[in-house]
Amino acid sequence: MATTHKIIPANPRLSSLLSDVTRGNIKIPVFQREYVWDDEQIMSLLDSIYQGYPVGSLLLWSTKEPLDHERNVGGFALPETPEDFPVNYVLDGQQRLTTLFGVFNSDMKTSNAELADRFNVCFVPETEEFVHYEVADPAKSINLRVILDTTKLLPELQRFDKDMATRIATLTERFKDYEFPVVTIKDRTNQEVCRVFQRINSSGTSLSTLELLAAWTWSDQFDLRNEIETVLEALSDKGYEQLDEALLLRSLAGVVLDRIEADELVDVSPDRLIQGMQKLKQAIYATVDFLEKELRIRNIVFVPFPIMVVPLVKFFSINLKPNVAQMTSLKRWFWFVAFTQRYKAGTNIAVVEDLKAMVELANGNAPFDGIKGGIEAALFKRAWRINSTIAKATICMLAQHSPRSFLSNNLVDLSSAMSAYNSREFHHVYPKAWLATQGIGFHESNIIANVCFLSQADNRAISDQAPAIYMPKIDSALKPAIATAALLPPGSLNGSWPYNDFIADRAGLLAQAANKLIETAIA
């Protein structure tokens, strides 16, 4: 294998490994999580080494490219590494390494006095136990921070009889000579290192690409994690709290690389990432405004394919002020992707193609002029599931027509209906329970063409009543307008239509409306 030489196994003695930490040759990058071990884990590790048990290996990444923001081991102040001198960053095993360095250096200058105090551990030779200094008898124990330094150890040994001194000497030899398996990765790209970390991280928590990118780009003026968190908070205030970090990073990849795989960002220069982040912030807000004001979508969960956000962000990262023709094209593209299920196959090819098309559109071309509808009525005879892509597309389409609630004739509050998964804002025109009494089963009754917006109050009032009972309660003068706003067949609100006839006509109307949106962007 061509890259075998880039992974180097070794078994340095523990004393040598700790010396490398002291000299600043081994550091813990900022993307690693904080120290999380409890006291029992600390004592267990020490006892395992004393007993000669295996305790796992360390994975290091050797690179001359320093990370601007790195955390020293356990809060202990360590020397800076000279420029052009390789540094070994800990990718796996930082909890073990931090523990071992801490217990043998608990009296060093530290920025975390509380943690250093936890590392203040003693060995009781009489019982061969490791205990915290607060519960240790000073006359019968020895602090671990002295055992690897001969000048400190020899005076301490004089306090013990020959048998206890021999046990302490054995302790010292076992720790000094303990061979710690270390695997060092060299000459790998940032992206390769990211993937390696994700696969081997023994904590069970995959490395976030954001954490790696934050380590690459951090400066006193810029912290990518803070930037992302600020955007997420702002989106949450606008009702888009479910637009998450992963989608933002894919959008960032779209802005910077015309790609959608966030992992690819780790090979981008920090300056380019910082510039991309500034574009992303403006573009994501413009995208949400477009979804809210132009399409009446109040929550990312109703976007049929959340990844549709990425091409939209790409467009707005280039052009924040689209003209009328561009705005029409964006809408047509949205409805085309939604109803044709363009992204359903799970492939990224179509998304990447659309990223390129968005660049053309933003620069004044018309890449979407040739798209056509071709949506058929059968699409709306599929099962109604509020989280299915076609159901979401239909909900968004119905929202364009300013639907009115049947009994009250009030406009449906889209802010409430489309702010979350709220099934009470939707209603089966022909109630399922009533259809069941007519011998029409769940799979025939629970379909998209049988669903409309309805206020919670009207939903409760109608409940499971037969159409022949509740439809006469609708103001007859308002029925045509209510039917039009709900994309219902004219005359269908008189309560006398057979269910199958209603569904056939309603599905046809929905298909016509979908095709019109795709071809004209007009509801």
Image (cartoon, rainbow, N blue to C red):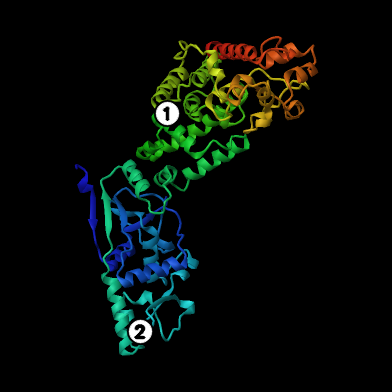
Q: The residue under label 2 is which amino acid type? A: Glu
Circle nearer the N terminus (1, 2): 2
Q: Alpha-carbon distance for marks 1 and 2?
A: 67 Å
Decide: is 209 above or below 421.
below
Instruction: Give 44 or 268, whichever is nearer the viewer.
Output: 44
SS of the residue under disc 1: loop
User: Can the viewer see residue 295 in this picture?
Assistant: no
Residue found at the very far bottom of the displayed protein = 161
Q: Secondary structure at mark 2?
A: helix
Q: Residue 312's x, y, as percent?
A: 50, 25
Which residue is nearer to you in this view: 495 or 121? 495
| Residue at the spot 43% in from the left edge and 65% down from the top edge | 41
Query: Nearest the camera: 259 or 365?
Result: 259
Measured as percent of width and height from the top left, residue 457 is found at 76, 29
Quick check: can you spot residue 374?
yes
Identified at 33% across, 86% down, the residue is 164
For label 2, count other residues whose C-alpha is less than 10 Å away and answer few (under 14), some (14-19) or many (20+). Answer: some
Where residue 90 sits: x, y (%)? Answer: 35, 55
- Amino acid at circle 1: Gly
Q: Are dots 1 and 2 in contact, CB under 8 Å?
A: no
Q: Nearer the viewer, mark 1 or mark 2?
A: 1
Between residue 195 and residue 445, name the one nearer to us. 445
Q: Is residue 499 above or below residue 314?
A: above
User: Badge 1, how many Cα within 10 Å: few under 14, some, many 20+?
Assistant: few
- Give coordinates of residue 117: x percent, y percent: 47, 70
Residue for point 53% across, 42% down: 229
Disc 1 marks which residue? 346
Question: Split into 4 quadrants, where in the image is the N terminus?
Answer: top left
Label ID, residue 140: none
Residue corresponding to mark 2: 156
